[in-house]
Amino acid sequence: MTTTPNTADLFLEFSRYKLLDQYWPRMRVCVESLTDEQVWWCPNTASNSVGNLLLHLNGNVRQWLVNSFNRLEDRRNRPAEFERVEQLPASVLIVRLDETLQQAAAVLARLTEADLLARYEIQGRNVSGLDAVYQVVEHFGLHYGQVIYVTKMLRGEDLGFYRELDGTGVFPGKSPA
């Protein structure tokens, strides 16, 4: 007997896919292709380096997914994510964000419709669990695009992330949405 997935299950699976199977692997390839100097390069004082974006994403995912759904104390220091004082090696940034994303994956795997409807206090806001998950995926996607742009700019080459498209705009093995 097969069960039809409900909307909550589909939303959570798609959120997990976007974060862990699409955005993160591609972002990781970008960061691994850059030198530590390039990871911390910044075009101007109004912009962020790739390194700062990785610190920021780690803080965001931890705060909005890991800590909120696990009802853990929030100790995030958001302003520190944008300081350029301590320039950690890219390899350290990758390990830290990967660990946080694995914890987030575990959270996404166990959430229920009730968790998505429940209320959480995050960054001084009262939000639903659905809001929290959506915020993380959307926010990660925004900064993912920035990292790809900076990587293309610094390397001067196509990264090949869309070679799997077969000319119709549909991923092989997937039906169109």
Image (cartoon, grey):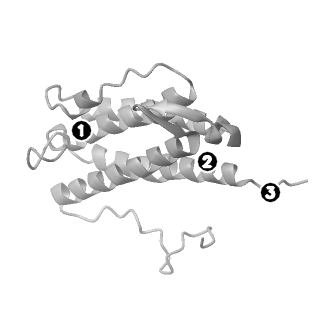
Location of residue 147 in the rendering, given as x and y in whole percent from the top left corner: 28, 51
- For disc 2, the neighbor class at 10 Å (few under 14, some 14 to 19, many from 20) is many
Q: Amino acid at mark 3?
A: Thr
Toward which corner of the image does residue 63 lie, by quadrant? top left
Q: Amino acid at mark 1?
A: Gly
Q: Which residue is mark 3?
A: 4
Nearest to the eye among marks 1 and 3: give it: 3
Q: Amino acid at mark 2?
A: Leu
Nearest to the eye among marks 2 and 1: give it: 2
Q: Residue furthest right?
A: 1
Q: CA distance from mark 3 to mark 2?
A: 15 Å
Q: Is residue 115 above or below residue 141?
A: above
- Residue found at x 36% / y 49%: 27
| Secondary structure of the residue carrying numbered label 3 | loop
Q: Which residue is mark 2?
A: 12
**CB under 8 Å between callouts 2 and 1?**
no
Q: Is residue 5 above or below residue 69?
A: below
Q: CA distance from mark 2 to mark 1?
A: 28 Å
Q: CA distance from mark 1 to mark 3?
A: 42 Å
Q: In this orientation, does residue 103 appear?
A: no
Which numbered disc flags the more N-terminal residue, 2 or 1? 2
Which numbered disc flags the more N-terminal residue, 3 or 2? 3
| Secondary structure of the residue carrying numbered label 2 | helix
**CB under 8 Å between callouts 1 and 3?**
no
Q: Which mark is residue 51?
A: 1
Q: Name the residue nearer the viewer: 9 or 147.
A: 9
| Secondary structure of the residue carrying numbered label 1 | helix
